[in-house]
Each structure stands twice: as structure tokens, then as C-alpha cells.
Amino acid sequence: MTSDDFERPVVILTGFGHPTAIASAMEAYMFLADWPARKRDPAHGFVLKACLAAIRGEIEPDTARGLFASWAEKHDLLAPDIAAFVGGRKEGSRGVA
């Protein structure tokens, strides 16, 4: 585990709704750096700087994770929590789901 790894990844939807796990401040930073300039806002710059600070060891990686997750949610990129759907399933006639 590198020093900028998140405790658990942030799963975002990219492309045609494909889930992508962002597991570290570096991965979040790279995603944000590739974000189109015309779509950037002040929050984007703030989260980008937080990820860089986590990479440098200046803040905890999970602080950057929380900011990245909030930014992703604001931009409707945050994937739904699949575990919430799967965890609620019961054993059916064809076995355990």
C-alpha cells in the first residue's frame, strides 16, 4: 500500500456508464487533470490541490478521498452503491444470490 492509497476506492461512472475504481490520490489527481478545461470550476481546483497534497504526504489520503467523492457526486459521476442492492437480496428458489 502506497502512502496515497485510499482506505476504500471511490467508484465513478466513466464513458458509457462504466464503473471505474479510483483507489488513490494519484489516480484521482490524474482523473481531475484530464477533466475538460471548459467544465472546471473552483471546486475542481480545490480537489486537485487536495489530491496533490495527499500525494506529497501533507494531508491524509482519505481527506482527499472525501473531497474527490463529493466533487464526483456534484458532477453526477459517483456510481450507485451496488452493495446496498446486493446485500438486500435473499436466498431464492435458485440458491443464494
Image (spheres, rainbow, N blue to C red):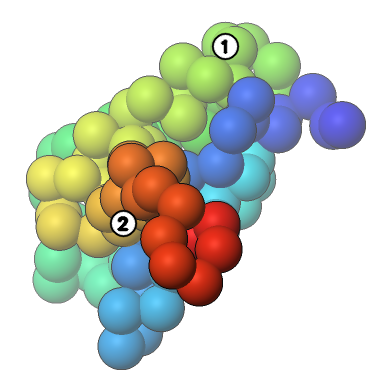
Quarter the N terminus occupies: top right
Mark 1 residue crowding within 10 angstroms, few (<14) / some (14–19) / many (20+) = some
Q: Residue 38, located in which quarter of the rendered image?
A: bottom left
Residue depicted at 36% across the width and 50% down the height: 89
Q: What label sits on residue 79 in the rendered view?
A: 2
Front residue of this view, candidates 55 and 14: 14
Label located before the other in sequence (2 or 1): 1
Q: Is residue 11 found left or right of 59 in the rendered image?
A: left
The residue lying at 71 percent from left, 30 percent from top is 4
Disc 2 versus disc 1: distance between alpha carbons? Answer: 25 Å
* Res 44 quadrant in image: top left
Q: Secondary structure at mark 1?
A: loop
Q: Of the numbered discs in the image, which one, if any, rests on residue 90?
A: none
Locate residue 81, reporting x and y percent: 33, 46
The kind of residue tagged 2 is: Ala
Tag 2 secondary structure: loop
Report the side of 84 relative to 29 (left or right).
left
- Provide residue 67's location: percent of width, then percent of height: 33, 28
